[in-house]
Structure formats: C-alpha cells, structure tokens
Image (cartoon, coloured by chain):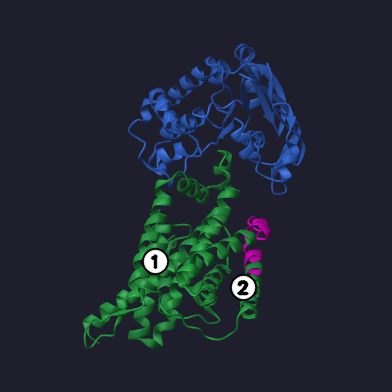
Chain colours: A blue, B green
Amino acid sequence: MARLLELRRACTGYGQLPILHSADFHIDEGEVVALLGRNGMGKTTCLKAMAGWLGLWSGQHLWRGADISHKYKRGGVARYLARDGLLLIPEDRGIFARLTAEENFHLIAGQKQKAEMELRFPELRDKWQTMGDGLSGGERQILSLARALSVHPSLLLLDETTEGLSPRVAERIWQILDELRKAGQAFVVVDKNWQRVATLADRVLFLAKGQIVESVTGNELRAHPEIAERHLGL
Amino acid sequence: MSFEFLLLQVLNGLHHGLLLFLVAGGLSLIFGLLGVVNLAHGSFYMFGAWLAWWASGVFGSYWLALPVLLVLVALGAFGLERALFRYIYDKPHLVHVLLTYGLVLLLDEARSLLWDDDVHGLEAPPPFARSLELGEDLPDYPVWRLVVSGFCLLLALGLWWLSSRTRFGAAVRAGVERREMAEGLGIDTPRLFLLVFVLGATLAGLAGALATPIASVYPGLDAQVLILSFVVVVVGGIGSLSGAFFAALVIGVADTLARDLVPAFAGVAVYLLMFAALVWRPEGVLAKRN
C-alpha cells in the first residue's frame, strides 16, 4: 500500500507552548487508524498538524511521499492538502453557523454530489435550507461527513467523532464509519469510545505527552484491553 | 418647517445613506473578512471624487471619465493589497492603524501634488443635469440625486445577490466567520481577500465619483467619509452587509436631519446613535441576540 501521510519527529504547539514532541507515524492508503490518549495529550493538535492547519516547528511533514514542510513559509498548506484530498472534520464539525446547510455543502461540492449524498444520507433531505446554527449536533456531523465525502477524499481526519451525540446518533455515525472502512476509505479517527474504535481500526496509536508511545492493531487491542486501560488511565 | 420639507430632507438623508453604504459596505467586509482596520478606505472615496472631477475635464465627459476612474481605483487597490495589506493581515490592529494612517497622509499628499487644495465643482452629467420643481415653498430637487439613489439601490441589490446567492458570497461569509475552517476546505482565502479588497475599494471610489456632481470635491473628503463609515460598520455589525445597509440609511437620515433641525447638535448625533447601538446591540443592529 502506498504511503499517504507521514510525520517525522514532528514538533508543534500553540504560541510558545509545545504540544506535540517528536511525533513519528504514518498513514497508508485505505488504512483506518485510531488515535487514542487521555485529554490534553495532543490528539487534536496532532490532527491539525497532519491537516496542515498548524505548521510544524521542526520535523518533516510528508504527503504522498513528498516533503511539504517547506511550504509552511508561504502558507496555504491546509488549502493545498484539502484540494489534494486530505480533509479534517474538527470536533465542532466545521459547519458555518451563518450559512445554510446547502451553502455549507456547496462550498466544495456541486449539485450532482448533493443528489448523491441525499441518497446516502436521507436525514439531510429536508435540512438543506436550515442555517448551520439551527442543525443538531448529529445533523452537523452528518452534513460535515457528506461534504467531505462528496469530493472523494484520499484521507479523512475525524476529531472526537461521536462527542456530544446521543447514543442513537452515535450508532449511526459508527455505522457510517464502518461502511467507509469496507469501501476502502482511509481515515484517522479520534474518539473516547475505544472499544468501538478497536473494532474499526487497522491500527491504534496511543499518544501521551505529545508522542506516539505505542502502536497496536485493532485486533490486539480487542484481545488485550489492559493496553487501553494502561494508556487511558481507566 | 413644513411636513413636505421634512420629507424632502428624509429623501436627502436616504440618498446620503445609500452613498455611505457603498463606502461602508466594503469597509465592513474588509474589516470582517480580512480583520484589517483600514483607515485608508476613505482615500479610495476621495480619489474617486477627485478623479471624477479631473477626468471629466480631460475627457470632456463624465460618462467617459467614470469607467476610467473605476479601473484606476481598482488597479490602485490591487497594487496596495499585493504590496502592503497582504503582509499585515495577521498583525495586531495597532500595526493596521499606524500603517493605514500613514497611507492616508501619503495619499492625501499625492492628491495635493497631483491637483491642488481648492474646492471644485462638477455639473451633473447629461441627461440628468436638471431639477424637479416640487412646489413654491420647496427647493428644486436635482434629478441626479434621484438617479444616484436608484443606482445605489440597484448596486445594494446586486451586492445582496452576490453575497447571499452565489458560491463566492458563501465563501466570503465562511471566511468572515472562520478563516481557518474555510482554508481547511480548500477555499483560497488570500484570493478572496484580494477580490473583496478591490471590490470594496472600487465601490468606495464609485461612491466618491457619484457624489461629486452634487457635493463638489475638496481636501479632507477622505476623513469625513471614513469616520461616518466606521460608525456605520459599528452600528451595522462588522462583516454584515445587510447590517451596513440598514445602519447606513439610519445614519444618513439622522446626520441630514440633525444638520437641519438642530445644527448645534449635528456633530454628535451619529455618535450618540453609535453609543446607543453599542449598548443595545454591540454585535450589530441586525445580529441575533445570544
């Protein structure tokens, strides 16, 4: 499988505060990777660094085998990566409050994709004219997924995928992610529900104090729950 | 003062407000999307006005001068954005204020060197160089004023359509709301910034050119329109076109009526409105209450 994304000795943070220290990992095509760790260990920062939202202070950022670290000087790395198929769905789902659901969708997708996504996500059908801030948490997550999937991304990054959703809606999201996995869609998922994550992911990376401290397969994690207990302090 | 005269003044105020909207709408978008406090925005209005007067003389026709001056203002704005503004978007507001204030002084000096420091008038262009007789006790009403008001309304409608009915407008609103997320979807925000900056500046230049046949040109036009425009932006809510439209009409009417009804009070009327708006609706008069 071809390598999609790689971070080598990646360091970054906010202002003067370092969050990610020398993180080393990669994502391959079609692979499902979960990023687990306690709160404040740098999961969101790691996703933002992968998507180019946050520039690296040091280390290398490789996308499709090419080092793109030098692009940070000119800016626009997030835009470059988004146009080349790497999309991040942040914890707040990234739905613009003052745009209708339809406008949110059409920021990157066309009419044809709207019809496709309506078939795939029927719950969006009568929500297109609702303003972003009038959508429920689940609707926002589904709209965000539909928007991202409409451009057939190579890699999706999903932060706190089911956070704040009702169990029924969360189940729907897990079902969608399972379908994506079966369809060969590569994605990185961050979620507190490590048991569900373990059934979904090919690989699980544990993040502690801004570093990848352990990497196991989903099957290994299911067989040895003590690994999660050790890293997540359960 | 008769009721008819009051109505006429309200009409004048609306005309003033519509022109103000052309300046303040652009300023509001530039402030909202780019985060730049652009004190030099009034300079585009000033150049629009002075170029209209000068180019009308050179070409012998206001209608020939108009497209030429719009291209010149747009090119000037394009050059300034590429050479200067794009480097200060992420800098603190103090940097914006210092840089753009310096620009105000430079551009005003350039105007003084290019032309002079006198007051110049310009006839309303044909076929609108006439006035309507409204009655014995009322002053005649210039047709140009009606034409300009109508044209500004059309432009406001066009801007509303651009902002609310096109993908460009949605992308601008997305960028105003959250630039990082817009970039994260692949939207080229620097290009949006450039387009909005040039569009805003050109509209300000157009407003100056449209106002010239009524208001004449003189030094200090820039500061006069800038201050009122900032009041409009604050009252209407930063980055909101509909808010700027509503606020510009209110400020235009209030400013005009205050000058006629209570001249001693005219200087502070619009600031009292701004104060009231800041207390009542600090996020803009049309913004939803949290």
Residue range of the region highlighted in magenta in the rendering: B81-98
- At label 1, the amino acid type is Ala
Dot 2 crowding, Cα within 10 Å, few <14, some 14–19, many 20+: many
- Residue plotted at (51% across, 61% down): B200
Depth check: B211 or A61 in front?
B211
Label 1, label 2: how far apart the Cα atoms are: 25 Å
The residue labelled by disc 1 is B247
* Quadrant of the image occupied by residue A159: top right
The residue labelled by disc 2 is B104
In the displayed structure, B21 sits above or below B128; it is above
x and y, in percent, of residue B225 in the image: 49, 74
Depth check: B32 or B9 in front?
B9
- Residue plotted at (21% across, 84% down): B135
x and y, in percent, of residue A46 in the image: 66, 34
Dot 1 crowding, Cα within 10 Å, few <14, some 14–19, many 20+: many
* Quadrant of the image occupied by residue A190: top right
**Image mark 2: chain:** B
Residue farthest to the front, as pictured: B60
**Image mark 1: chain:** B
